[in-house]
Image: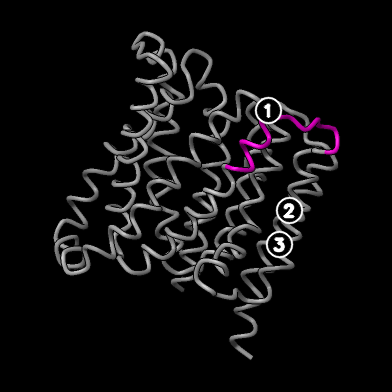
Amino acid sequence: MKRVIAFICLITCTLIWGTTFIAQDTGMDHIGPFTFNATRFFVAFLVVIPFVFIFEKEKIIKYVKPEKKLFIKLMIPVGLSLFLGTQLQQISLLYTDVANSAFFTIFYVPLVPILIYFLFSDIPHWSVWPSVFVCVLGGYFLSDFNDADVRLGDGIVLLGAVFWALHIIYIGKLVTEFNLPFFIALLQNLVVAVLSFFLVLIFEHIDFNKIILETYEILYAGILSGGLAFVLQLFGQRHIPAAPAAIVMSLEGVFATISAWIILSQILGFNNIIGCVLILSGVLFSQLVPIYQSKN
């Protein structure tokens, strides 16, 4: 039952991320990528604060204090990988189109089991590999990448995929050791907000009038994506290992395509439908095969 709830959490999380892509894109009409991320994650930080005090205030002292060094050791790569992943993703939207970004971002799916093996010598369940292949193939069809030109900005997306993979891996390690999803979400949001603010001071300038023009996009990305979705990711990865969790999260591209079709009236072509079916098949295969084998 816990795994089913975790699966629902990850599905909901990717649904929110898929729809947030539109807000991320339009949210830079008047402000730069660093300003958008600084304000977005500061909003997310504020949203999570009351939940930490209500649900985890006593647990933080109980669980973190005795294992402070381990918590910091795992929290640092979580915060830094999220910071670098979000910055590179946001910057890439300035230099490449949606098709390229969608295709190259999905490469975090095969990177997760590969990096897990090299970092921790963990070998994932055999069902992960065919699922990864099917999901990447689905991403190819979903993005209509065959009609796209490779650009320098695509390298930014690929590099970002490495950090997204590391974030998924270390989130899994951290939330398994410390069942504090709200507190972890609070800290990682704070890290991204503060480091993004320093980038704003160096490369951009603060213009509150322009920030106000992006209020709806910032609130949507901050409250739902930063505040809710990352908490749901933590709840989900508490009971689903990193490699199959990454496969589930590849549905982000499916939800992004469907939301663009509904909200922006973009055409949903035959290749897009094939891509959606392939990714969904890969997700179901990765989740159902281990369950079936454990019962036989």
Q: Using the image as rendered, state which of residue 196 and residue 184 is in the foreground.
A: 196
Of labels 3 and 1, the one closer to you: 1
In space, the residues marked 3 and 1 are separated at their CA atoms by 27 Å
Q: Amino acid at mark 3?
A: Gly
Q: Which residues are magenta?
A: 146-159
Q: Amino acid at mark 2?
A: Val
- What crowding class fits label 1: few (fewer than 14 Cα within 10 Å), some (14-19), or many (20 or more)? many
Q: Position of residue 274 (x, y in %)?
A: 81, 49
Main SS of the magenta part reads: helix
Q: Which residue is mark 2?
A: 136
Q: Classify residue 20 as left or right of residue 36.
A: right
Q: Residues within 10 Å of mark 3 (few under 14, many from 20)?
A: many
Q: Amino acid at mark 1?
A: Thr
Identify the residue at image location x=39%, y=28%: 219
x, y percentage for residue 24? 53, 29
Quadrant of residue 62 in the image? bottom left
The residue to which callout 3 is attached is 282
- N-terminal of the pair, mark 3 or mark 1, is 1
Mark carried by residue 96: 1
Measuring 54% from the left and 74% from the top, which residue is drawn there? 121
Give the camera-side residue of 66 and 225: 66
Residue 251 position in % (x across, y down): 63, 51
How far separated are the C-alphas under marks 2 and 1?
Answer: 19 Å
Give the distance between the C-alpha atoms of the residues marked 2 and 3, in whole angstroms.
9 Å
In the image: residue 26, left or right of residue 1: right
Q: Secondary structure at mark 3?
A: helix
Frontmost residue, 288 versus 86 = 86
